[in-house]
Image: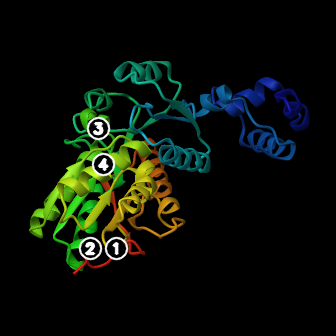
Amino acid sequence: MVKITDVAAHAGVSPSTVSYALSGKRPISEETRLRIERSIRELGYRPHAGARSLASSRARVLALVLPLRKGMHLPVVMQFATSVVTAARDHDHDVLLLTQSEGEEGLLRVSHSAMADAFVIMDVEIDDRRLPLLRTLAQPSVLIGYPAETAGLTCVDLDFRQAAEVCVDHLAALGHRRVALVGSHPEVYVRGTGFARRVAAGFTAAADRHRLASSVHPCVDTPVAAHALAGQLVRDHPDLTAVVVHNEPIVQPLLAALAALGLRVPRDISVAAICPDEIAEPAATPITSVAMPSAEVGARAVDLLMAKLQGAAVPETTMLPVRLTVRATTAPPPA
């Protein structure tokens, strides 16, 4: 491993001069600085993170606050986390992952220790108790998700309300008159998680606008729960001809449950989902879906954060557009 003494010997200066060039603590001549930079490049020297941060008074680390809670679908959550890490590396930043449900205490601990320059906040609730603190911290933040009040914050996400609306619009245009939303885990609604509440609100509003009969059904994310709910829907709503699913782990189990009840998709019942393309496309019957653009959301969050770190003005809200892909699971209702 190349050391600072190797750079000093190569550049013909003392190790302390190399340190000053990295930290900016003392002025050095432009000629000396360029010679040191050339030696660093030729030797492939990578400064220690502590020394590197001194020059900019920054750690070059982003804190990703991702509390792992009941009802979260880890494969999708990790898609968002991976996109944040990838985008951060493109900006020469590392990511500190915070997974405990510490709330304000965790934010204060990281803020006071200067371990990170900024925060990316996930699993945002409608009335998130972390928001007053985020508005006052020295470090900037970007939320992946939308609370009820966005003033003084920077938020980015898919427009989940519109995602539900376009699914219902599509089903109404096909002629369906009763629709059901198979929603997230009940705990997600109890916590007041923003994306789940917005999907339910958009679904209900669109159904009312089209004068459709509708119902919302939170569902535990297990195959057993999916099969039980499918049976309940058929018993309670014999005129049901279409379902929107916003619960990634049970998309396939629900389709299997409907088939076990003798319902053919889409001949007897149509199914649309809000889920990643990785779930919708490879299905035995490809699923009509609104895509979850996790890579784009994560990258946009990091770009906004980098702009804030540089003092640039950014919008309070960034809603990513909705993309509905019609596949083989939706069709007009049976005659």
Q: Residue at x 42, y 57 (%)?
A: 275
* Residue identifier under label 1: 330
Alpha carbon distance from label 1 to label 4 = 20 Å
Amino acid bearing label 2: His
The tag earlier along the polypeptide, 2 or 1, is: 2
Amino acid bearing label 1: Thr
Vertical order, 270 against 31 (above or below): below
The quadrant where residue 129 appears? top left
- Secondary-structure class at tag 2: helix
* Residue identifier under label 4: 229
- Quarter that holds the C terminus: bottom left
The circle drawn on residue 170 is: 2
Looking at the picture, tell me which residue is in the foreground, 297 or 172.
172
Alpha carbon distance from label 2 to label 1 = 9 Å
Alpha carbon distance from label 3 to label 2 = 26 Å
Looking at the picture, tell me which residue is in the foreground, 107 or 307.
107
Amino acid bearing label 3: Pro
Alpha carbon distance from label 4 to label 2 = 23 Å
Vertical order, 316 against 25 (above or below): below
The circle drawn on residue 186 is: 3
In this view, the mark in front (2 or 1): 1
Q: Residue at x 65, y 26 (%)?
A: 50
Q: Residue at x 52, y 49 (%)?
A: 79
Residue 22 spot, x, y in % from top left: 69, 33
